[in-house]
Image: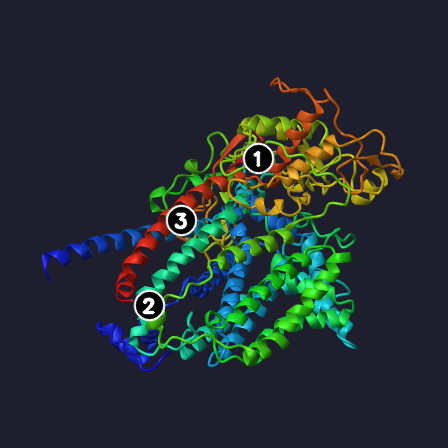
Amino acid sequence: MSGPSTYQPQNAFLKWFEARLPIGGLIHSSFVVYPTPKNLNYWWTFGAILSFMLGVQIVTGIVLAMHYTPHVDMAFNSVEHIMRDVNYGWLLRYLHSNGASMFFVAVYIHMFRGLYYGSYKEPREVLWILGVIIYLLMMATGFLGYTLPWGQMSFWGATVITNFFSAIPLVGDAITTWLWGGYAVGNPTLQRFFSLHYLLPFVIAGVVVLHIWALHVAGQNNPTGIDPKSGQDTVPFTPHATIKDGFMVMLFCLFFAWFVFYVPNYLGHADNSTPANPGVTPAHIVPEWYYLPFYAILRAIPNKLAGVVAMFGSILLLAFLPWLDTSKVKSATYRPLYRQFFWVFVLACLGLGWLGSKPAEGGYTIAARILTAYYFIHFLIILPLLGLIETPKPLPNSISEAVLKKAKVAAGLVLVLGLGAMTLLASGSSVSAAEGTPHPPRNKWSFAGVFGKFDQAQLQRGFKVYKEVCQTCHGLSLVSFRNLADPGGPGFTAGQARTIAAEYKVQDGPNDQGEMFERDGRVGDRFPPPTTWKNEAQARALYNGTVPPDMSVLAKARSYERGFPLFLVDALPYFAYQEHGVDYVVALLKGYKEKPPEGFALPAGGNYNEYFPSHSIAMPPPLTDGRVDYSDGSPATVDQYSKDVAAFMMWAAEPHLEARKRVGFQVMIFLIIFSGLMYFTKKKVWADVHKHA
Amino acid sequence: MTTTTAAEPTRRDFLYIATGTVGAVGAAAVAWPLVSQMNPDASTIAAGAPVEVDLAPVAEGQVIKVFWRSKPIFISHRSKKEIEEARKVDVKTLPDPQPDSARVKEGHDQWLVLIGICTHLGCIPLAHQGQYDGFFCPCHGSVYDTSGRIRGGPAPANLTVPPYEFVSDTKIRIG
């Protein structure tokens, strides 16, 4: 894309082809001989990382779409089907759901790099605006994708976001109804969201092509912000940039793989493991972490229309950046004042992100208003003024000269962005716990940690507790009897699974007479629904207005807020803590008190429980010492029962946990070795450049 | 080129080859889940378990259709005449030579169990039709006899006999 091609194919067929479609020359000039400034630092590899992530998302997404069903009655279960039954379905789904977050991690670094080095300035304005368009498309795609699993957060996220448009005067309601295809978010909404979620990534890919085209016309910016003056200042794209980008893509994969294999639900919300319920909004509704700063801006403004305008305005403002920044000097390296304001702005964005995850009340709202104001002041007042009053440092004469002097890039960038990202990541994922509820104590779990494995005896005991106590009221609708004999599970033999299945009565039919009948369960059957209630209405009538939740994914649907700074630690290797749900279940089962504390008015039909968010739970204490007989000599106590059944629930919710951790370890080892090789290859390729620098 | 500089490229080439090889292995490992996910999933395999069919209600001359592994299974209660017709043919003259006795279970000659899918291109043949009063495929005109053997038309092979066994005199388990 830069001048006439020097590509001269030797092969006769390639010559013939090139004369008719010069695609070889296009690739050659764009990605082989294309001159790239030799002083690019590693922050410049995020463009390649983003292209890679777009590819990962498209490939895994196409695969998921082969197994997913966009229908309100089936979407949730079809995602669980992917997680349980599809070959490597758990891997593909976790790659896709965590991949979305990784995509945003990379895009934020890419954007802040552009801000720091002035990559939006003349002649790169169109390049920058295309980037803003890609970012908007990414946000839309991420939002649409998040609705597809049709959990509670999907449904209510879709409701809240689509309601943005109801703020538009006069036609707002008509527009929201049009978006929904109904009177509320429902099946038509889900189906169109699925269609658009499939479409938009290809639109992104198209704009990415324009983005790269514009980049190759203007040429890459570089840490000095001055244009390459001679061949001395540049190196050919291949192999130099290719190998450097490849090396960083592998390092990024290492980071990505950690999330996929060891903390796959860290960035999600426990509430999204509860199927969508149009009648109940979750206690704390928070968007995905990557939207949090904008969510904070939305909530900071106490007027519906103004809030929505400010939120969209804060993003659209970026498109005008090339004209808001009046300084002629690009790189912050030579702009002593801007450099400081840049970091203040980074902190303001992180602060907004953190506030976006907090309830909109009291001090949080005040802080969010101050930071929102600062966000706009930065772009509308500070940047235009700075160009007029700042005295830049002298610019080097050429890139080669600058490389010799080696202007150090703030190493703190890694630390600040890393920690900041973690804060955002995690604050988005923290989930409901009413004030005054103590933290569930942590238990030791055999399945925790990098090498975690289920304790088969414990799972079998837990199954016994489920069978003899829980299943009267609680279903296990997503688990099949055959799963009891699956590898990585309770370790029953195929014969034992058959015997267990045969103990259950399963409804089948209609038979030749057109009547439904009962037969003995078979291994291929799912666990039948509880026998004590036929439908939700009956359950409500029986159980004090509540429906006993299905236990298939319950261990993932429950969590509690760990608070700052513990939630940061929870994602780290060695400290990783992913057992919030099971710890909560154990605490709940053991948390009954016969008498509520002084001053607590227990509603009729409620039972006081220390760990239940409202403290009044409809389920009476289900376990008593000695209720279930253990044949393996484990203590027949409430404490032991609780842990065993919680472990069983963890397996039911995440049946491929062992495979995930095992494959994860292999992937990590591979990536470490491959990154090492890439690093040394990169060093070899760049050896000449460094020697002459 | 002197020998001293020739040593350098060798070491460098080794590094490049090692990196490339490890990368290729990684790419292949990534490809595997993407390929494997298109194979039948665990629930589909579980649903393909054997099915039992009660033969008692099937009258002589009747052909019933049941499903096993999403395939239609024909169970034909053959009359004496049908069995005789199937047996008197000279096997050697058939396009896909197979004696009738090899297509039924010993002692249960009257029961013919077939996968009801034409071996030509997958349509479902009609029972008691065609020149031999066996099966006739309406798609492209393949004709099968009362043993389900191909006798005319484009189909290359006899209708397939699925794996099955008699659990009792009036009950079979397919699969």
Residue farthest left in this picture = B2
Whether residue A209 is situated above or below residue A530 in the rendered picture:
below
> Mark 1 and mark 3, same subunit?
yes
Residue A52 percent location from the top left of the image: 45, 61
| Dot placed on the residue nearer the N-terminal end, 2 or 3 | 2
> Mark 2 and mark 3, same subunit?
yes
Q: What amino acid type should be assigned to the residue bearing mark 3? A: Leu
Tell me the CA gap for discs 2 and 1: 67 Å
Tell me the CA gap for discs 2 and 3: 33 Å
| Dot placed on the residue nearer the N-terminal end, 2 or 1 | 2
Q: How many marks?
A: 3
Quadrant in the picture for residue A653: top right
Whether residue A550 is situated above or below residue A152 in the rendered picture:
above
Judge by depth and name the residue closer to the eye, B95 or B118: B118
CA neighbours of label 2 inside 10 A, class few (<14), some (14 to 19), many (20+): few
Residue topped by disc 3 = A671
Which residue is at 73% across, 45% downward?
A: A433
The chain to which mark 2 is attached is A
Judge by depth and name the residue closer to the eye, A171 or A303: A303
Q: Which mark is residue A404?
A: 2
Q: Let me know if residue B149 appears in the view.
A: yes
The secondary element bearing badge 2 is classed as: helix
Q: Which mark is residue A558?
A: none
Quarter of the picture holding the C terminus of chain A: bottom left
Q: Nearer the viewer, mark 2 or mark 3?
A: 2
Whether residue A270 is situated above or below residue A37 in the rendered picture:
above
Residue topped by disc 1 = A482
